[in-house]
Amino acid sequence: MAVVRRSLAEAAARNPNILGFVAKTLALDEDAIAIPILEACASLSDADLIGIIQSCGNNVKRAAIARRPSLREAVSHELIIWGDCAVAADLLSNVGAAIPESGLVHILDKYGAEAD
């Protein structure tokens, strides 16, 4: 059954016409199913993404969101607050992510010592 859901998630992630509730249902599924949707599905709103960031309980999903082709500052901010160092690294590597200056300061304050 997970194979079918994974195939559905991969197809849905590339479909700009996928219904939002279908995308959100897949995004809340187990990590292997959720990752393609979280990385690419345009049907997820910023509010959907922020809700997932705040409630998912793991950084695998947060990292997938950090790798989306584009992110607005509000979503980036939540990733910085809720994510770990790997999420921050994915976010900083994402040229399509709008990162607020305060977020960059927060990353430096939170992880700057880890660079040593």
Image (cartoon, grey):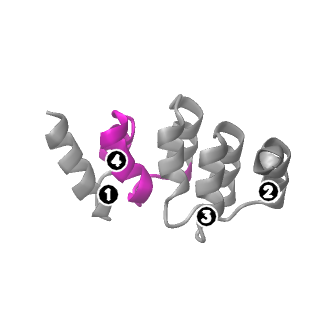
Give the percent coordinates (x, y) of residue 70: 54, 66
Depth check, front residue: 41 or 113: 113
Determine whether label 2 and label 1 are within 8 Å by CB. Answer: no
What is the CA distance from the residue labelled 2 to the residue labelled 3?
Answer: 13 Å
Instruction: Tell me which residue sits at (40%, 59%) in the image.
Output: 40
What is the CA distance from the residue labelled 2 to the residue labelled 1?
Answer: 29 Å
Quadrant of res 110 = top right
The residue under label 1 is 13
The disc placed on residue 23 is 4
For label 4, the SS is: helix
Q: Nearer the viewer, mark 4 or mark 3?
A: 3
What is the CA distance from the residue labelled 4 to the residue labelled 2?
Answer: 30 Å
Residue 15 appears left or right of 113: left
Question: Chief secondary structure of the magenta span?
Answer: helix
Give whichever of discs 1 and 4 has the lower sequence position. 1
What is the CA distance from the residue labelled 3 to the residue labelled 1?
Answer: 21 Å
Q: Which residues are magenta?
A: 21-46
For label 3, the SS is: helix
Determine whether label 3 and label 1 are within 8 Å by CB. Answer: no
Q: Is residue 69 above or below residue 79?
A: below
The disc placed on residue 93 is 3
Q: Residues within 10 Å of mark 2 (few under 14, many from 20)?
A: some
Give whichever of discs 3 and 1 has the lower sequence position. 1
Give whichever of discs 4 and 2 has the lower sequence position. 4
* Amino acid type at image mark 3: Ser
Q: Is residue 27 above or below residue 38?
A: above
Residue 114 appears left or right of 91: right
For label 2, the SS is: helix
Q: Residues within 10 Å of mark 4 (few under 14, many from 20)?
A: many
The disc placed on residue 97 is none
